[in-house]
Image (tube, rainbow, N blue to C red):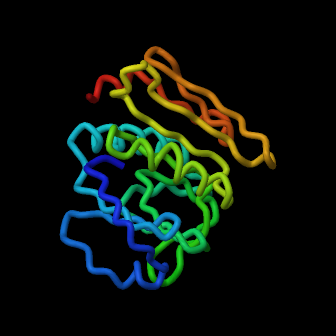
Amino acid sequence: MDGEESPNKQVYTLGEFMSLEVEEGARAELVGGELFMFSSPTYAHQRIVSVLCARFEAFFAGKTCKVCVAPLDVIIKEHCVQPDLIVLCDTAKIHGDGKCHGAPDLVVEVSSKSTEHSDRMLKLNLYRNNGVKEYWIVNPLNVEGVIADVFRFERGDKIDYMQYAGGDTAESFLFEGLTVDMNDLINEV
């Protein structure tokens, strides 16, 4: 997620969070009782999400798993997040309210300087401890050259982890054959 992250130190329940009125164009998430407000994403962020979505959609065409992009509320226990992209193999998790209730199989966050802490700490732990099997953190503007970090959580306490830089092709642990050329992302920024 891109845009300015604005933590509010008041503790909220999921019920309180769901009844909040959020301004047009703003996005809100609840992680660990803490409310995070985000401004709308940048053009570069949206182009990266678009490239990833196109690659994921092409891979999952004709398969059971479905690809969704933000904003879509994903409710995991007492948390509500809006990942940039999810892969959901159990569409029964989409309830009558149109929200995803439960962990998606794969989550992608397009990170920025303002969301890095939330993406790398809070959300990584949320996803790891609540049933997400694979988590990608993508940041083509990373000055250290790492474009994507890919984590697999489905093996108990063991975490599989790979980093990808420009020139590399990121590969999914979970879905054999799902790949993304990092140069395609760099070319969008």
Q: Residue furthest right?
A: 156
Image height of 122 relative to 189, above or below: below
Please give the name of the residue rendered at 62% of the width and 58% of the height, measured from the top-left corner: 64
From this viewpoint, which residue is outermost toward the top?
167
Count of numbered tags: 0
Q: Where is residue 178 in the image (x, y as percent from the top left)?
A: 58, 36
> Which residue is rendered at x = 62% and y = 36% of the image?
172
Question: Among all residues in the image, which is located at the extreme front?
Answer: 9
Could you tell me residue 107's position as x and y percent?
Answer: 53, 50
Task: Specify the quadrant of the image occupied by residue 7.
Answer: bottom left
Q: Which residue is drawn at 26% across and 74% down?
A: 22
38 or 56, nearer to the observer: 38
32 or 87: nearer the eye? 32
Q: Quadrant of the C terminus?
A: top left
* 44 sits to left or right of 105: left
> Left or right: where does residue 134 sit relative to residue 182?
right
What x and y, as percent, mark residue 152?
68, 41
Residue 157 screen position, x and y as percent? 79, 46
Q: With respect to residue 60, does 95 lie above or below? A: below
24 vs 85, nearest the viewer: 24
